[in-house]
Amino acid sequence: MFKKTILIATLIGLSSTSLASGHEVKPQTSAWSNQSLEAKIQSMPQGDAVRGQAVHTQMMCNACHGETGVSPSRNYASLNGQTEQYTLKMMLDYQAGRRWEHYKQADIMVKLAQAMNDQQIADVAAFYAEQAPSVWGNVKPLDPKIERLVRKGDVSRMITPCASCHGAHGEGKDITPALAGQVPEYFVRTMQSYKQKHRFNDVHEGMSQFTQDLTDTEIQALADYYATLGAKK
Ligand code: HEC
Ligand code: HEC
């Protein structure tokens, strides 16, 4: 994995030292409002899945995210079956440094997004949206307590049901990501980032609020739940 990162870093013109030290200075960006995000998404070019597949291969996205977006490793997010708008938003957020987590690994996404134009971003987003959702690992029985949290939420902690936004099958919609089949290690990491406010690219910090009162055990159980939920398209 380390060797692969260096190889890719060399290909996109980074030195291993700049990778190791990461971005020292966070670019100045303003947070999205619903209006500014909507306007930006509307202004993006139409994506093409066939061209997107070519970009995915040429820019070596496949090295970390797999040929069809199914991550071959527990280190990386899966992208197959993701909504087009969510992928657009993530690439724009990395590009502008809005998504700026403390993990060294996010750094490569910032550099790659900065090397892409709007058309290439739209094309990969169209490609991932066309790939079938999958299941990560062996299907396990769904924990009824967690299923309740997903479907009913928890009024006492002001947690809105996850399914009300992410869909009954974790299929996502527009800028709300699909969660079904997501790599559980990535899921836990990103939920903890929201909770600790290291990830702050969500509009009005909605996810940061929902994660505040979730326990580590619940976050892990939610990750296991969604990993094998099996989205229907
Ligand atoms: C060296 C490995 C590596 C390569 C190459 C790579 N990625 Fe990533 N990607 C990651 C990691 C690690 C994350 C999660 C980063 C984080 O935690 O912020 C990620 C996250 C993402 C996300 C956000 C996923 C989500 O669910 O929020 C998208 C979209 C994405 N990558 C697209 C791409 C595209 C497009 C390319 C090629 C241009 C690419 N990646 C190349 C490692 C990689
Ligand atoms: C009010 C709607 C809403 C609710 C309720 C909600 N989410 Fe989200 N969630 C979102 C949106 C929108 C995003 C994308 C934020 C961004 O742009 O970074 C998101 C992002 C995420 C991500 C990051 C996905 C990725 O690929 O990086 C995870 C994981 C997640 N939500 C899990 C949950 C869980 C678990 C619950 C229930 C406890 C929940 N969400 C409740 C709207 C919601």
Image (tube, helix red, strand yellow):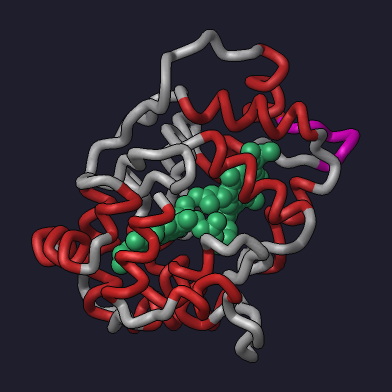
Question: Residue 16 versus residue 205: which sits nearer the camera?
Answer: 16
Tell me which residue sits at (51%, 80%) in the image.
18
The x, y position of residue 29, in whole percent, is 62, 87
The residue stretch that appears in magenta: 153-158
Tell me which residue sits at (82%, 48%) in the image.
212
Q: Is residue 228 above or below residue 119?
A: above
As for residue 109 lying within the magenta part, the answer is no
Q: Is residue 64 above or below residue 233?
A: below
Question: Residue 10 versus residue 66: which sits nearer the camera?
Answer: 10
Question: In this view, which residue lies farthest toward the right?
Answer: 156
Question: Residue 11 versus residue 90: which sits nearer the camera?
Answer: 11
Residue 104 seen in the current view:
yes
Question: In this view, which residue lies farthest toward the top?
Answer: 141
The x, y position of residue 218, in whole percent, is 74, 29
Tell me which residue sits at (24%, 62%) in the image.
60
Tell me which residue sits at (54%, 34%) in the image.
184
Count of numbered badges drawn on the protein: 0
The x, y position of residue 167, in whole percent, is 49, 38
* Left or right placement of residue 221 versus residue 109 in this view: right
Q: Is residue 78 above or below residue 13?
A: above
Residue 87 seen in the current view:
no
Which quarter of the figure is the C terminus placed in?
top left
The x, y position of residue 136, in whole percent, is 41, 27
Q: Quadrant of ligand 1?
A: bottom left
Question: In this view, which residue lies farthest toward the bottom?
Answer: 28
Residue 10 occupies quadrant = bottom left
Residue 209 occupies quadrant = bottom right
